[in-house]
Image (cartoon, rainbow, N blue to C red):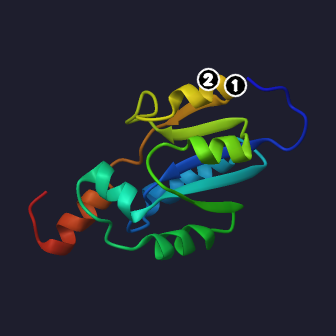
């Protein structure tokens, strides 16, 4: 863990497509861990590579939606699921992610190299973009 020398910076990242209460819960709980919340929003190409499909909403709209949340301080475009460039830029004290990932798919060594604490938080049950997409298309869950 890094020595405390100023405001505690928390970083989290995600696609944040079809922003829902699960996203809001995650962002709120992340913000409670520090003084400044920086959020990386994965690009359209990065989302396609990660999920195998494009997001419903483009990156510009997803970033504007996350920026509109009053307790989010900074929103940055993140090219892929690898947050390394943003971690190196902001040097957060903590990185938060949902508990569906035990470690980052890409860039976990950056956390270790920079001494950034890794915290996972439980997902909000029964809500996800996948569930919302199925409901919108009429597919069975």
In the rendered view of the protein, which quadrant contains the N terminus? top right
Check disc 2: other Cα within 10 Å, few if <14, some if 14-19, many if 20+. Answer: few
Point 60% across, 55% down: residue? 39
Looking at the image, residue 61 lies above or below residue 80? below
Residue 14, placed above or below residue 3: below
Picture quarter with the C terminus: bottom left
Residue that mark 2 sits on: 112
The location of residue 91, given as percent across then percent down, is 73, 40
In this rendering, the count of numbered labels is 2
Marks 2 and 1 close (CB-CB < 8 Å): yes
Residue found at the very far left of the displayed protein:
140
Q: State the SS at label 2.
A: helix
Q: Between residue 91 and residue 133, name the one nearer to us.
A: 91
Residue occupying the point 54% across, 44% down: 83
The answer to whether residue 72 is seen in the rendering is: no
Q: Residue at x 68, y 68 (%)?
A: 70
Q: Give residue 115's mark.
A: 1
Quarter where residue 94 is shown:
top right
Q: Is residue 24 left or right of residue 57?
A: right
Rounded to the nearest whole Å, what is the CA distance between mark 2 and mark 1? Answer: 5 Å
Q: Position of residue 130 (x, y in %)?
A: 26, 58
For disc 1, the neighbor class at 10 Å (few under 14, some 14 to 19, many from 20) is: some
Which SS class for mark 1? loop
The answer to whether 1 appears left or right of 121 in the picture is right
Nearer to us in this view, 70 or 44: 44
> Could you say where residue 134 lies in the image, as x and y percent from the top left?
18, 65
User: Could you say which disc has been placed on residue 127 in the image?
Assistant: none
Q: Position of residue 110 (x, y in %)?
A: 59, 30
Snapshot quadrant of residue 34: top right
């Amino acid at each position: 863990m890094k020595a405390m020398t100023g405001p505690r910076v928390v970083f989290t990242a995600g696609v944040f497509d079809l922003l829902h209460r699960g996203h809001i819960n995650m962002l709120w709980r992340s913000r409670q861990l520090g003084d400044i919340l920086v959020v990386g929003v994965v690009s359209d190409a990065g989302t396609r590579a990660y999920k195998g499909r494009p997001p419903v909403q483009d990156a510009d709209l997803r970033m504007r939606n996350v920026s509109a949340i009053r307790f989010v301080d900074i929103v940055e475009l993140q090219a892929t699921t690898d947050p390394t460039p943003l971690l190196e830029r902001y040097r957060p004290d903590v990185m938060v992610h949902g508990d569906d990932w035990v470690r980052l798919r890409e860039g976990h060594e950056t956390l270790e190299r920079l001494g950034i604490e890794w915290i996972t938080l439980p997902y909000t049950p029964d809500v996800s973009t996948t569930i919302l997409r199925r409901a919108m298309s009429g597919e069975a869950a």
